[in-house]
Amino acid sequence: MQNVHQQIWYNQPNAQDLSGTHYDHRGLMQLDALKAELSQQNMQYYFCGPVPFMQHIARQLTNWGVKPEQLRYECFGPHKIVEF
């Protein structure tokens, strides 16, 4: 697809995970290294994950001045089982 760019972070890659093949960055996602690529006017940002991750990413983007309406996200994580 044109105009689609992905970056993959592995916090703790396994021995068989190859940098540049399976992932692009090691450690927690820090977007500053990509700021020049990610700071285009009217860009839309898509991300998904558990709530703490989402807050971490949204905070970095809004600190750059990205408007909340440019953020597209979906939360997921462990489900709680309700006992009846």
Image (tube, rainbow, N blue to C red):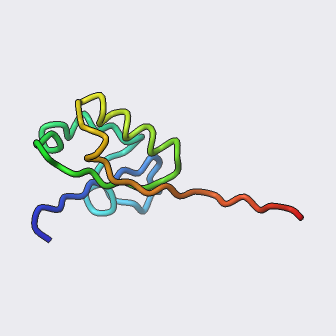
Q: Which residue extends farthest top? A: 63
* Image location of residue 81, percent across then percent down: 77, 62
Note whether 9 is above or below 31 in the view shown: below
Using the rendered view, name the quadrant where residue 4 is placed: bottom left
Q: Position of residue 5 (x, y in %)?
A: 19, 58
- The residue at 44%/45% (across/down) is 54
Name the residue at the right extreme.
84
Tell me where residue 58 appears, x and y as whole percent: 37, 39
* Residue 56 x %, y %: 43, 37
Up-down relation of residue 31 to residue 72 (above or below): above
Residue furthest bottom in the image? 1
Residue pictured at 42% horizontal, 62% vertical: 16
| Residue in view at x 53 percent, y 58 percent | 76
Which of 4/30 is in front?
4
Q: Assign the N terminus to one quadrant of the image.
A: bottom left
Q: Nearer the viewer, residue 31 or 11?
A: 31
Left or right, 57 with respect to 36, comes to right
- Please state the total of marks drawn on the protein image: 0
Q: Is residue 29 left or right of residue 40?
A: right
Query: Residue at point 24% right, 30% down?
Result: 64
Residue 59 or residue 28, whichever sits in front: 59
Q: Quadrant of the C terminus?
A: bottom right
Q: Is residue 31 above or below residue 23?
A: above
